[in-house]
Image (spheres, rainbow, N blue to C red):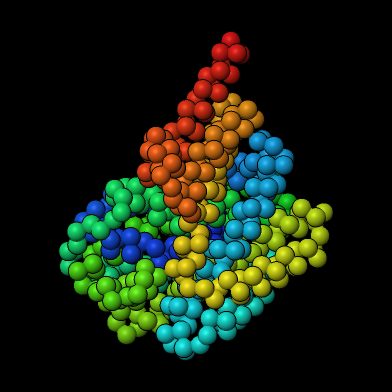
Amino acid sequence: MKKTKEILVTSFALFSLFFGAGNLLIPPLLGYNSGGSWFLVTIGFMITAVIIPILGIYAHARLQGTMYDFGKKVSPLFSVVYCVLVYLISIAIPSPRTASATHEIAIYPVFGTSPLLTSAIYFSLVLVFVLNRSKILDFIGKFLTPFIVIMLLLVIGIGLFSSEFITNMPNLNAPSFVSGVLEGYQTFDAIGAVVVGAVIIVSLNFKGQVSFNVRKDLIKKSGLIAGFGLFIIYAGLISVGAFYGTEINIDNALNNDMQRAVLLRGISLAALGSFGNMTLSILISLACFTTAVGIIAGTADYFKGLFGDSQKIYVLTAIIACLFGVVVGQLDFHSIIVLAYPVLLFIYPITIVLIFLNVIPEKFAAPIVFRTTILVTLVFSIPDVVNFISPSKILKNLIDFIPLSHYSVGWLLPMTVAFLIVNLFKIIKNK
């Protein structure tokens, strides 16, 4: 009974640490724009927003160390640089984004206050939780997440029950499946997996001496349950967005950011009536808050370990991350998404490959395999990033030459070929 309770608490905590601003705001608009193709879009979205992140949790269950262990087979220097880069990105984009979403959807419509005031109060509360590090897992898993899940299921369940199941024509910039895959990037869930997975490991260590295999089993089962929860919620939000496409008008919204807010508010009102606005405000605040706590706690954990397990470094990192959140959190949600996109095109492929290599059997993931596949992934990710920042005819011709580059996954086929060739060479050499 105690073990089951521990699995559920850890599952809820994992779900909540994953589920933040983008996870709530992105799927409904994706469903709205996908119209009748919402099911195919959902499948693509699940790959980058559920399957890969849960594989990241499985990798943590096998390693049971820090994020450093994900990349150490490439080289110690690469792993340190990768970790620092991911944590800096995490406190620079997804963490402030949670404050921005909270302000725009939950705070400003009710109180009309400035984003600076919202961000300052928001990250002050985040700092309180992060400094009480040993209690994070239990508080989020036992209290906050069940409340978030119940409200989400209410909005989705009642929303689907009361909709007419009529959809618009698709309005996407890429094929439905590809659109789902690329929008899954924007949830930051794969990066979240390597960050919050480490938070879970540290939190379990606070609970006392538990054997490696017991922790491994606990993390794997918790990851599976959390992944199933994410799947249900994402599929529900995408489908509700698609089915309300003919009932809610978002064309008057100034940008995608406002469209997301208008659509989500419209769905909540349709599902829960006048109670919907208050429900949405509480829901977005809690979902964003738990994610910000997880990101900053994970970042502080890493730098604490990097500097000889120093508690002073932990506190200093948490304070700096929160101050940075206050500054960047004043930007609107859409601006942060635009800022994030080229960064994601660079770091996401590397993260996906590292997760993949840490999940497969070790005989197929020797250090030479790590080094080759990461190098190839890095090289073939750069054209996507540069083309997004500064498009040119020469670069366009190069991208046309690389398979799948039109869909911003030009790294995928070269990485797969490199992985197979290096492993084939190893097999031949051993024989």
Q: Is residue 205 left or right of residue 38?
A: right
Image coordinates of residue 306 in percent, x first then y, are: 76, 53
Q: Name the quarter where the N terminus is drawn.
A: bottom right
Residue 165's quadrant in the figure?
bottom left
Q: Is residue 116 left or right of residue 309?
A: left
In this view of the protein, can residue 337 be seen by the observer? yes
> How many discs appear?
0
Q: Name the quarter where the C terminus is drawn.
A: top right
Image coordinates of residue 383 in percent, x first then y, are: 48, 43
In this view of the protein, can residue 49 be seen by the observer? no
Q: Is residue 46 above or below residue 412?
A: below
Task: Please report the residue visible at 61 percent of the width from the left and 63 percent of the height from the top.
Answer: 91
Q: Is residue 420 left or right of residue 155?
A: right
Task: Please report the residue visible at 41 percent of the width from the left and 35 percent of the height from the top.
Answer: 402
- Check the image and name the residue furthest to the top: 431
Q: Give the camera-side residue of 177 and 2.
A: 177
- Check the image and name the residue furthest to the front: 393
Task: Please report the residue visible at 39 percent of the width from the left and 63 percent of the height from the top.
Answer: 26
Q: Give the camera-side residue of 149 and 358.
A: 358
Image coordinates of residue 352 in percent, x first then y, are: 51, 43
Q: Is residue 381 above or below residue 126?
A: above
Task: Please report the residue visible at 40 percent of the width from the left and 70 percent of the height from the top.
Answer: 257
Q: Give the camera-side residue of 348 and 359.
A: 348
Residue 29's quadrant in the figure?
bottom left
Q: Is residue 300 left or right of residue 408?
A: right
Q: Is residue 337 above or below residue 110?
A: above
Image coordinates of residue 87 in percent, x first then y, are: 63, 56
